[in-house]
Image (cartoon, rainbow, N blue to C red):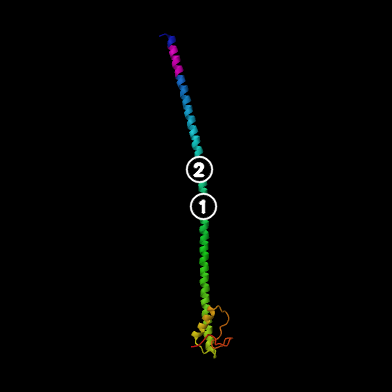
Amino acid sequence: MSTGAIVAIAVGAVIVLAIILILGRMARGRRLERRRGQARELRQEATARAQDAEQVRASADEATARAERREAEADEQAAKARSESVEAEREGEHAAQEILAARTRHDRAREIDPDTPDSAEREAADLDAQRANGGDGEATPAGAEMPDGSPAGGARG
């Protein structure tokens, strides 16, 4: 072989190698660009999902806050109900004490009053009947007459 042919073969080999290198770089560039595009899409998806997750978390936080407010309101209502129950119980106890004091005074009045021949049971029954009828005035003493001339407390037996 002649030197010209060897030089031509060497130049051809260099050209072929250069073409292979250029094509390889171009293919690598396309692969990198494709991977960059995929990475960009993944980042966009990740950003969208993060925004969605943030909205869901905010909604969950609002629901939790509403539930806590309702629970606090329920606790407040329960405390108020307990307080009202205690107050009602106190009022009931006070009413019982007042009833006892009133009966004690009636007993004492009956002991002192010479015109009261009836028993304590009869007077208590008259007071209970008056209270049941909604009367809030003074009881008509046993043995007294009603405005229509009938005896107070009904027939005696």
Asked if residue 122 is among those painted magenta in the image, a careful observer would answer: no
Q: Main secondary structure of the magenta part?
A: helix
Q: Which residue is mark 1?
A: 63
Query: Helix, strand, or loop for circle 1?
Result: helix
Depth check, front residue: 138 or 111: 138
> What separation in Å lies between label 1 and label 2 (alpha carbons)?
20 Å
Is 71 on the left or on the right of 1, as rendered? right
Q: Residue at x 49, y 30 (%)?
A: 33
Query: Mark 1 and 2 residues: CB-CB less than 8 Å, in contact?
Result: no
Q: Residue at x 53, y 68 (%)?
A: 84
Q: In this picture, is 64 found above or below 89? A: above
Which of label 1 and label 2 is nearer to you? 1
Three-letter amino acid code at the position of disc 2: Ala
Going by the picture, which residue comes out furthest to the bottom? 114
Query: Helix, strand, or loop for circle 2?
Result: helix
Picture coordinates of residue 73, whole percent (x, y): 53, 60
**Any mark on residue 50, and which?**
2
Q: Residue at x 46, y 22 (%)?
A: 21
Sequence order check, earlier mark of 1 and 2: 2
Three-letter amino acid code at the position of disc 1: Ala
Picture coordinates of residue 31, whole percent (x, y): 47, 29
The picture quadrant where one finds residue 113 is bottom right
Going by the picture, which residue comes out furthest to the top? 2
Q: Residue at x 48, y 25 (%)?
A: 26
The magenta stretch is 6-16
Depth check, front residue: 32 or 49: 49
Going by the picture, which residue comes out furthest to the right? 147
Picture coordinates of residue 96, whole percent (x, y): 51, 77
**Any mark on residue 90, and which?**
none
Picture coordinates of residue 8, whole percent (x, y): 45, 12
Q: In this picture, is 99 found above or below 112? A: above
- Decide: few, some or many residues near mark 2? Use Cα within 10 Å; few <14, some 14-19, many ≥20: few
